[in-house]
Image (spheres, rainbow, N blue to C red):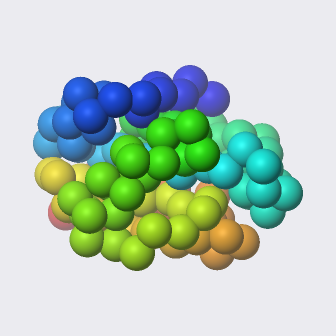
Amino acid sequence: MNWRKIESPEHLAEATEHSHQQPVLIFKHSTTCSISRTVLDRLQRNWNEAEMPVTAYYLDLLQYRTLSNDIAQHFQVTHESPQALLVCKGKVIYHESHFGIDYTKLKKAANDLLIM
C-alpha cells in the first residue's frame, strides 16, 4: 500500500485538492492503540491498487494531533481513532472508526463514486 503522509497543513490541503480529481482515503492512526494497529494491518493486507480507485493518505494522529483536530473541523466529523474518511470533491462521503473500518465497504463506497 502506497501511503502519502499528512504531516502539515499543506499536506491536508493537497489531499483535499486531490479529492477533486480522484477520491481520497484519509486514515487517522494512533501508533499506541492496538485496535488502530489491527485495523491498519487488515486494511493493508486487503488493499488492492487495481480495485481501489483512491489515493491513500495516512496521519499519525499522536505526532500530529493538531492536524487531526483540523481534519475533524474541516470535514465536520467527530474525531475518532482509528478513523477512515473517504473524501470526494472536498467532502466526506463515507467515514468510519474502530472495527467499523472495513476494506470491502470502503471499496464499495469508492467504486460507487465512479458510477455517479
- Residue at 38% in and 69% down: 94
Residue 73: quadrant of the picture: bottom left
- Residue at 45% in and 68% down: 79
Visible in this render: residue 79?
yes
Q: How many marks?
A: 0
- Residue at 34% in and 63% down: 72
Residue 59, above or below 29: above
Residue 106: x, y in percent?
51, 61
Residue 44: x, y in percent?
71, 40
**Quadrant in which the C terminus appears:** bottom left
The front one of 22 and 57 is: 57
Residue 31: x, y in percent?
72, 44
Relative to 62, is 67 on the left or the right? left
Relative to 116, is 84 on the left or the right? right
Visible in this render: residue 42?
no
The front one of 26 and 66 is: 66
Residue 49: x, y in percent?
55, 32
- Residue at 30% in and 53% down: 70
The front one of 79 and 110 is: 79
Residue 7, above or below 51: above
**Quadrant in which the N terminus appears:** top right
